Image: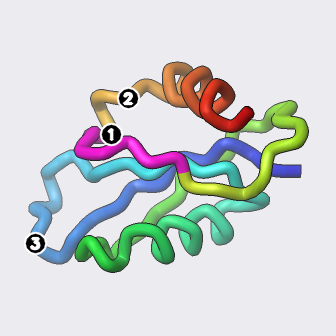
Amino acid sequence: MVKLIRVKCRRPSDAQDDDPYVGVTFATHKGHAEQLCRDAFADRGFTSFEAEEPIDGPFENVQPQVIVYEGRRLTAAPIHTLCRAAMETSF
């Protein structure tokens, strides 16, 4: 079963006090979510990936995947909004 997991993504040039970019995934666990984001965003210069606590579903018939929010900062995307959008885009 997959879970909805938000991942903080940073580039080496990002200041520590800047809000990180966010990757949203359907993944089986935090390490899986970090790897999915690493695979998806490494070519964009992101090198640091830190998964937050998962949100349990039910998310039925959903495959592990990254849901991309281009240019969104973490503080601009509340998790309940991401959850709703993720469910809409996954079917």
Q: Contact, CB < 8 Å: mark 1 with mark 2? A: yes
Determine which quarter of the picture holds residue 14. Answer: bottom left
Colour pattern: rainbow
Q: Is residue 28 visible?
A: yes
Residue 39 is one of the magenta-drawn residues: no
How far separated are the C-alphas under marks 1 and 2? 6 Å
29 sits to left or right of 69:
right
SS label for mark 1: helix
Q: Residue at x 61, y 33 (%)?
A: 89
Q: Number of callouts in the render?
A: 3
- What is the span of residues highlighted in magenta in the rendered image? 67-73
The x, y position of residue 61, in whole percent, is 88, 42
What residue is disc 3 on? 13
What residue is disc 1 on? 74
SS label for mark 3: loop
Residue type beneath disc 2 = Ala
How many residues crowd mark 1 within 10 Å: few (<14), some (14–19), many (20+)?
A: some
What residue is disc 2 on? 77
How many residues crowd mark 2 within 10 Å: few (<14), some (14–19), many (20+)?
A: few
How far separated are the C-alphas under marks 2 and 3? 22 Å
Label 2 or label 3, whichever comes before in sequence order = 3
Residue type beneath disc 1 = Leu
Q: Contact, CB < 8 Å: mark 2 with mark 3? A: no
The x, y position of residue 42, in whole percent, is 36, 77
SS label for mark 2: loop
Q: Main secondary structure of the magenta part?
A: loop
Residue 69 is one of the magenta-drawn residues: yes
32 sits to left or right of 75:
right
Residue type beneath disc 3 = Ser
The x, y position of residue 17, in whole percent, is 14, 52
8 sits to left or right of 13:
right
How far separated are the C-alphas under marks 1 and 3? 17 Å
